[in-house]
Amino acid sequence: MLPSQTKHCQSLPKGRGSTNRTITMNPAVILMYLLSFTSSVEANITFGSYKNPEYWWNLGLLPWHRLHEVPASFYQHKPLCMQSYGLSRSQLIICHQNFDHMPIISIGARIGILQCEEQFKFRHWNCSSGKEAFSLGVTTRHGTREASFAHAIASAGVVHALARSCKEARLLSCGCSKAERPQQLHRDWIWGGCGDNIDYAYRFSKAFVDIREKEKSFPRNSLGLARKLMNLHNNRVGRLAVYKLATVACKCHGMSGSCSLRTCWTQLSPFPRVGQRLQERYESAIKVKFNRRGTQLRRANRHLRQITSDHLIYLEESPNFCAVNPLTGRTLTSGRECRLQGHANERCTVLCCGRGHRTYTREVRERCYCQFHWCCSVECQTCSRREEVHICN
């Protein structure tokens, strides 16, 4: 059974251990930290000359992970919520009410963005647009399949980060997973341990991410309503990918490692596996349009299979990434690294849009000849090697 759905930002999930924690701290130290932090924030939200106020995943640009170094008393000071580009009014309320969650959400958005960049770095769309580092690109402003993947991977990242943080006791309002014992688990094995709390993470992620869309109101048959429905669907696909790929991990007990007894718990799959699953959904994404009443989306080609919660959906075709910018005389893939071998869509012949590529040699320095010394260190040498790099014209 899926986690229960949260309808309003005021009804966020609550878990065990939600008692208040008070730690005193020198106000001067708080002020110095805040000043250094906000200047760092400003530096990070202005990559190049680009700011994108449209998306909550801008949190992935901010160094909010540093808030883990600050005592809980600092959470009473929340000016950073107002400085976060992309948060809607309801998301700001959640930010103020659950400020200790925001560094985790920031980390989740960031791992989603970085995973996107890793998977698409040799594709026409590489999760950015030119100088907009970590931005997921202006392509996501339209109802393309790229936008569908961006919403799904960012939403999945938040679930993944929150679930692990609950397990690691980084949050006061949640702890280890309380998931029910799987029916197929061996009857002699113990269901316990400290599992990743995916149920809580799913509910909180849904409350925070989806509220941005739900607070909007659009007339029937409008583009705004279509994008709202599309984004909500794809957000859910991302959350479900994390939920469905979770596994049961076990630890053996018994004499001489006989493993006669095991303790088992819920465990997240590595996030790259989640990203790969969503990329498969990206490749098979379904184009949709309004139904006759103009209130829901349906498949554009009614003769093909129905839309399910596993399918990414999109409204319009992707732009021509090989189109030449009349101002620069270059394509979006100019200057990008490509491969001579590999997946067909990643090769230079495709990525470079038929404009050719140039090759040069670069020196790579890496660790080598590593040796383990008892106890407990690893010493390595630094080796150099030369490799060919291919760059699109």
Image (spheres, rainbow, N blue to C red):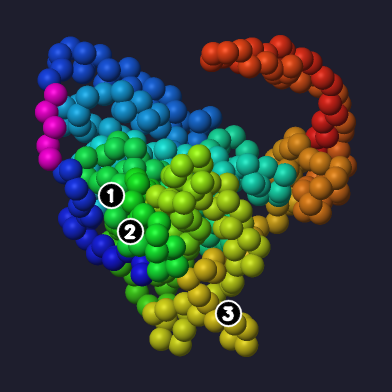
Q: Which residue is at 18% across, 43% downward?
A: 17
User: Which residue, given by chain and number where applicable, does mark 1 sit on?
Assistant: 91
* Crowd around label 3: few <14 · some 14–19 · many ≥20 (10 Å): some
Name the spot of residue 115 as percent of width and height, x first.
57, 44
User: Which residue, given by chain and number where applicable, does mark 2 sit on?
Assistant: 179
Residue 268 among magenta residues: no
Identity of the residue furthest to the front in this view: 255
Name the spot of residue 226 as percent of width and height, x first.
44, 70
Indicate left or right for 258 with 74 as reference.
right
State whether residue 216 appears in this view.
no
Q: Amino acid at mark 2?
A: Ala
Q: Which residue is at 22% across, 24% downward?
A: 71
Q: Earlier in the sequence, mark 1 or mark 2?
A: 1
Q: Amino acid at mark 1?
A: Gln
Is 76 drawn above or below residue 137 in the view shown?
above
User: What's the CA distance linking mark 2 and mark 3?
Assistant: 38 Å
In the rendered image, which quarter contains the N terminus? Answer: bottom left
Element marked by disc 3:
loop
The quadrant holding residue 335 is top right
Disc 2 vs disc 3: Cβ atoms closer than 8 Å? no
Disc 1 vs disc 2: Cβ atoms closer than 8 Å? no
Residue 300 numbered mark, or none: 3
149 and 293: which is toward the camera: 149
> Which span of residues is magenta-colored?
19-23
Element marked by disc 2:
loop
Indicate left or right for 252 with 170 as reference.
right
User: What's the CA distance linking mark 1 and mark 2?
Assistant: 28 Å
Comparing labels 2 and 3, the label whose residue is closer to the camera? 2
User: What's the CA distance linking mark 3 and mark 1?
Assistant: 32 Å
* Crowd around label 1: few <14 · some 14–19 · many ≥20 (10 Å): many
